[in-house]
Amino acid sequence: MLDADLQRYLEHLRVTRRLAPRTLSLYEDALTRLQALARQYPLELRQVQNHHVRRWTAQLHGQGLAPRSLALMLSAWRGLYRWLGGERLVSHNPVEGVRTPKAAKPLPKALSVDQSVALADFQNPAGSDPRVEARDRCMVELLYGCGLRVAELVGLDLQASGTAQGWIDLPSAEAHVLGKGSKRRAVPLGREAAKAYQAWLQVRPLLARADETALFVGMRGQRINANQVRLSLKARALGAGVPTHVHPHMLRHSFASHLLQSSGDLRAVQELLGHANIGTTQVYTKLDFQHLAKVYDAAHPRAKRK
């Protein structure tokens, strides 16, 4: 049975704070665990000290509780002691200053080269809108071929100007974009991206409003937004049979990973991605190593396990 203080606090969360039932259930689970840990000593909840909380956090982490779950649990405990302090039932909050172990950052997901090419080369069935087909193919080529962020893609204008965030310079075969931190950079425009760009320019007037300066437009003829790009890319990936959820940033990850696999030039990849810190780019060396490890496991005779 829950301690009287816990019951009163949960009632406070339900009535005064009006927490959602799901959130309230998570808090109750976390507080029940706190009570169980305290009773092992034994301790009253009001007697818990900072060193107890640190020990229990390390203990639970060692038992395999994920950092995010630990963070939620500590948040519930911290809230309890903050409330007890407000009720003048404890003199300090023993959870203050206790941090959860950092969660390992998941590696960015990238498509294989074959999947990326299949996505770029995919053509919608006969009867689909050729304007949309040309636009979507061009967007994929710029996302994957140039490593653009989705914000950089939708910010492209038809022509260079003093107010343009970005544009395509076809004679120089470059894409000029405004990246994070308002930093401009130029990215080489590959042959396939240039072809897709020219094909889109031929049909763009059939879709865009006469006064629209954006390179990419939606069905209403105005600048396309990031969500429209995501939906278009998702539909294209499904049509191409790519067996994973594809989003614009995945194509940027694929661009970086494939380029690094081929060149091994981390500094060049950093420049092309527009990363201010090379540490941000170094995550792709891990992706590259994963690729090499798979090749090794598949090909090297000493890698095969019985």
Image: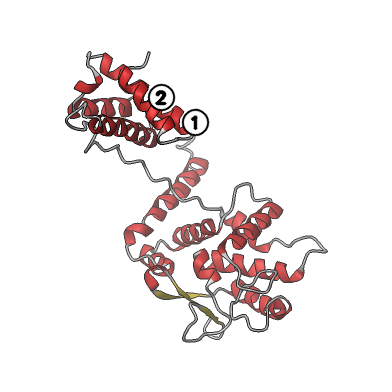
Where residue 247 sits: x, y (%)? 56, 55
Q: Is residue 250 above or below residue 188?
A: above
* Kind of residue at badge 1: Pro
Give the left or right position of residue 188, taking residue 79 as reference: right
Where residue 112 sits: x, y (%)? 56, 53
Identify the mark at residue 167; answer none if there is no mark: none
Q: Which residue in the structure is indicated by mark 1?
A: 21
Question: Which residue corresponds to the image point at 35% horizontal and 41% vertical from the top-left?
Answer: 103
The crowding category of the residue bearing disc 1, from other C-alpha atoms within 10 Å (few below 14, some 14 to 19, many at least 20), is: few
Could you say which is closer to the camera, residue 193 or residue 82? 82
Could you say which is closer to the camera, residue 290 or residue 80? 80
Q: Which residue in the structure is indicated by mark 2?
A: 29
Could you say which is closer to the camera, residue 6 or residue 231? 6
* Kind of residue at badge 2: Asp
Question: Which residue corresponds to the image point at 21% horizontal and 25% vertical from the top-left?
Answer: 52
SS at circle 1: helix
